[in-house]
Amino acid sequence: MANQELSNVSSSHRVESFAIELNDDGHSDILNERPGVTPELTHETHHHKIHKGKGGWKSAGLILVNQGLATLAFFGVGVNLVLLLTRVLRHGNASAANTVSNWTGTVYMFSLVGAFLSDSYWGRYLTCSIFQVIIVMGTVLLSIATSFFLINPPRCGDAFGEVNCNPPSSVGVAIFYLSIYLVALGYGGHQPAIATFGADQFNEMDPVEKHSRALFFSYFYFALNVGSLFSNTFLVYFEDRGLWTVGFLASAGSAILGLILFLLGTSGYKRYKPCGNPLTRIAQVFVATIKKWKVKVPTDGKMLYELEGSASAIKWSRKIHHSNELRWFDKAATITVKDKNVEKSKQDPWRLCTVTQVEEVKALLKLLPIWMWTIIYSAVFTQMASLFVEQGAVMNTKVGNFHIPAASMSAFDIISVLLCTFIYNELLVPVTGKLTGNPKGLSELQRMGLGLLIGLLAMLAAGFTEIERLRRVNPGEESSSLSIFWQIPQYVLVGASEVFIFIINIVMGVTAGDSKPGWIPGNLNEGHVDRFFFLLVGLSAVNFICYLLSARWYKYIDIEPEDERKSDMEEQQLDV
């Protein structure tokens, strides 16, 4: 999910966590974003740009406000979802936690859909607009579902158990699930496009605007966290008192306002053409490699096929230089006698691919082990929206006469992310930069490894908190006298990831049965949530070791320097 600091490895939405080499402006060196244009390079500007808006901070400001409002709407739905499932829809703790995990996972899966449509067909503006409409539809439908079908009698499902909800109707449940998955689709598709669309409002070839572009990502991160913080404090307060519809109407209002403000800035936005379907480029490499599986690859990478000048197989991006890893795929870029006899303009891309295409495939394959070791770690984040909330709901939530909503404890996670980001940027980067020679301080892989360790510590804190909670359970009650503030360490330490898992299903299947309630039963006092947290500690430790081995093997890609690309483009203009 602002999001460059992998030391926190935070969510979709708050911290981008994969081991992609990031530029200072937050863009990836693996699939680099459009490199920008200068006033001199007008031929690229006219070719790539489809709307001549001025952009700048006026347009970027609307995008920042939009991001804050969209995040408020999303977390207004998600932050208390697990308690809605248990109190209103009468799910068990394990079932509710698993449902939230699956729902959260679909958000990240839909992010892939949004990114694909944005980069390949729709462009960022249209992608943002369409998916925001879907968010509005989902939040409005959820408000209708809770108002007319689920919250019966009024104010049922509150934190005090004063009013129990009647069994929901099948129609109400169907509308409920349709609405929350519309929200997941809308927010997931919106997120990958909105950040880069905001960055598009600045020209990275202009020194002043390049600085503004980098600054935009910091403000973007701040807007995201402000929206999330508001949801995790104010909205959960109403929902915790049985005013579910009020909370969801606030989310709907936020989504509608965000969409209106976004559309108001339409005439001022800079908009660019999509860069083409990456799946086609990737498929071409695999097909060409298979066709040439008997061809011998030249030892000199310069003998492989590549486009001349500034042109790149990845539109509006720089070339990727050849690497010596996974050389079997170099067959796709090997020029055979048959290829030489074909005119350059008539080359079959399913038989002969560029070095850039091949290196794009190599980069993705090299990332797969890194991504794979984030799957177990994703369990850490999903607990913050599920079991952490369920655990907090059966703790002492009172400070004097004030009741603290269990879901609002996630505010400490947001504060922790902001604070750690500031500490890292302002204190650790200067020190580690001098020690490592890396101006960014630690490398992306090192920061990601640090995030994995923090996640392990978060599960340790959660496990010990559960042990202490069980020791202080009030006789004959489900609640414990242990203060909910004991959860602060696990929220502060928790880092988030973007892949959904089914680990709760597995644990319940193994631990329940033969009259045993399992580790995560309806009454947490009869189970062993602490064992589940410690299981995650063990899995995280094994996961961390595997990650270290993969990180040692991984090598960053080598991209054509911007100066070299600019020089080629200027030479082409002189020729014209």
Image (cartoon, helix red, strand yellow):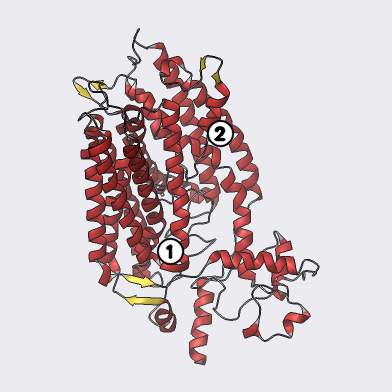
Q: How many marks?
A: 2
Could you say which is closer to the camera, residue 158 or residue 311? 158
Label disc, if present, on residue 540 of the rendered structure? 2
Res. 153 image quadrant? top left
Q: Nearer the viewer, mark 2 or mark 1?
A: 1
Instruction: Say whether residue 279 is left or right of residue 522.
Output: right
**How would you rate the neighbour count of disc 2 (Cα within 10 Å): few for under 14, some for 14-19, many for 20 or more?**
many
Can residue 268 be seen from the camera position used here? Answer: yes
Image coordinates of residue 473 in percent, x first then y, are 37, 12
In the rendered image, residue 230, in percent from the top left (x then y), is placed at 25, 42
Q: Is residue 441 above or below residue 208?
A: above
Q: Which mark is residue 118?
A: 1
Q: Position of residue 330 (x, y in %)?
A: 71, 67
Residue 86 vs residue 559: left or right?
A: left
Q: Farthest residue toward the front? A: 170
Residue 69 in the image, given as x and y percentages of width and height? 27, 51
Name the residue located 68 percent from the left edge and 74 percent from the top edge. Answer: 352
* SS at badge 2: helix
Residue at left offset 55%, top offset 26%: 509
